[in-house]
Image: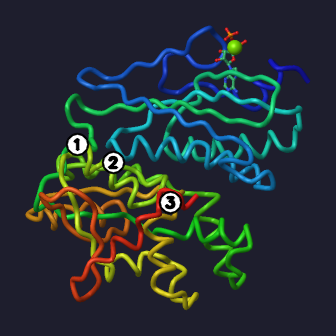
Amino acid sequence: MGEFDLIARYFTRPVRRSPLGVGDDCALLQPRPGMQLAVSTDLLLEGRHFLSTVDPRRLGHKALAVNLSDLAACGAQPLAFTLAIALPRIDEPWLADFSEGLLALADRHDCELVGGDTTRGPLAINITVFGEVPAGQALLRSGAQAGDDVWVSGTLGDARLALEAFRGTFSLPQEVFEAARLRLEQPQARVALGLALRGIASAAIDLSDGLLGDLGHVLDRSGVGATLEAERVLPLLAAAPAMKLATPAVLELVLAGGDDYELAFTAAAARRAEVEAAARQTGTPVTRIGHIDGTRGLRVHDAQGQPLAQRFAGFDHFL
Ligand code: ADP
Ligand code: MG
């Protein structure tokens, strides 16, 4: 099998919405009038972003999910994506599973594979995703204001827990491990929530590198600070009840774990009911974990209101 048979068999499907898909020098997209195109790209390298032993179905899913997560953070509706892939060899069972996982998620979000590039080399996957958002309505990192609430979707830290279990740092009961592993290998992009938060959230970001670092980007871009409440943050680790971990270990996983692909966002306190309605409508759990304040920096307070932040000074070097 050659390059073009491979593309035809595993990565070509009839386009539904786009005017032109795989097979020409360019794909063509048709954003609707009044819409802006939202574009994001992510590169996944074997050994760096995924383990070589991962189920190719899950890898196909994740490669697209991490890109959809960026669209979600901007409140953009997915339209289409391209796939550039380097493969060490043509392994048809692997390709069949990879494309199945990839295209199943693409179908779920009505996001079409319209083109790409295929070459031989160490396994690497680069997806570029295109979405649309009404002009001026994209959720940005720069809109957080003092007094806003800080929210996150879903659970945090479980993906990192699974990675640490693979590395042998933690040994987990089988059930806990499988659940955490699913969070690592098959993240769910919060696209519906991102769309529902347009006009409600003041700022948003998706969590790929850990809450403290990623929320820090929102604070920097918005010129504000934030205080988080440890009591609200600790329960975010889904595995926590089964794990009996000490508080610092849980906080470390939740605040600096990474690979969560949840949304962190801010919204005026007056909009709490609207945030909760958006969460209900989209079937996405959300938790209010703190607030934005005018003092720069990110603080974490315990139940007594005492700062815990200095304990996490080393988080940049966690990985
Ligand atoms: P060119 O040399 O003009 O860049 P290629 O020969 O690399 O085109 O690719 C042929 C066609 O197949 C193009 O339309 C390209 O977008 C598409 N394509 C290549 N690799 C992939 C892939 N992995 N997934 C989807 N489409 C692909
Ligand atoms: Mg090419």
Kindly identify the residue that appears in the image at 46 percent across and 68 percent down: 156
Q: In the image, 211: left or right of 92?
A: left
Residue 120 lies, in percent from the top left, at 82, 25
Residue under pointer 3? 260
Marks 1 and 3, Cα distance to the nearest angstrom?
21 Å
Residue under pointer 1? 142
Residue 177 lies, in percent from the top left, at 67, 76
Residue in front for this viewpoint, 31 or 16: 31
Amino acid type of the residue that numbered disc 1 sits on in the rendered structure: Ser
| Marks 1 and 3 in Cβ contact (< 8 Å) | no
Residue 281 lies, in percent from the top left, at 30, 62
Tell us which disc is closer to us: 2 or 1: 2
Residue under pointer 2? 217
Picture quarter containing residue 306?
bottom left
Q: Which image quarter holds the N terminus?
A: top right
Amino acid type of the residue that numbered disc 2 sits on in the rendered structure: His
Tell us which disc is closer to us: 2 or 3: 2
Q: Residues within 10 Å of mark 3 (few under 14, many from 20)?
A: many
Q: Which image quarter holds the C terminus?
A: bottom right
Residue 254 lies, in percent from the top left, at 46, 70
Marks 2 and 3, Cα distance to the nearest angstrom?
16 Å
* For marks 2 and 1 on the same chain, the one whose residue lies earlier in the sequence: 1
Residue 117 numbered mark, or none: none
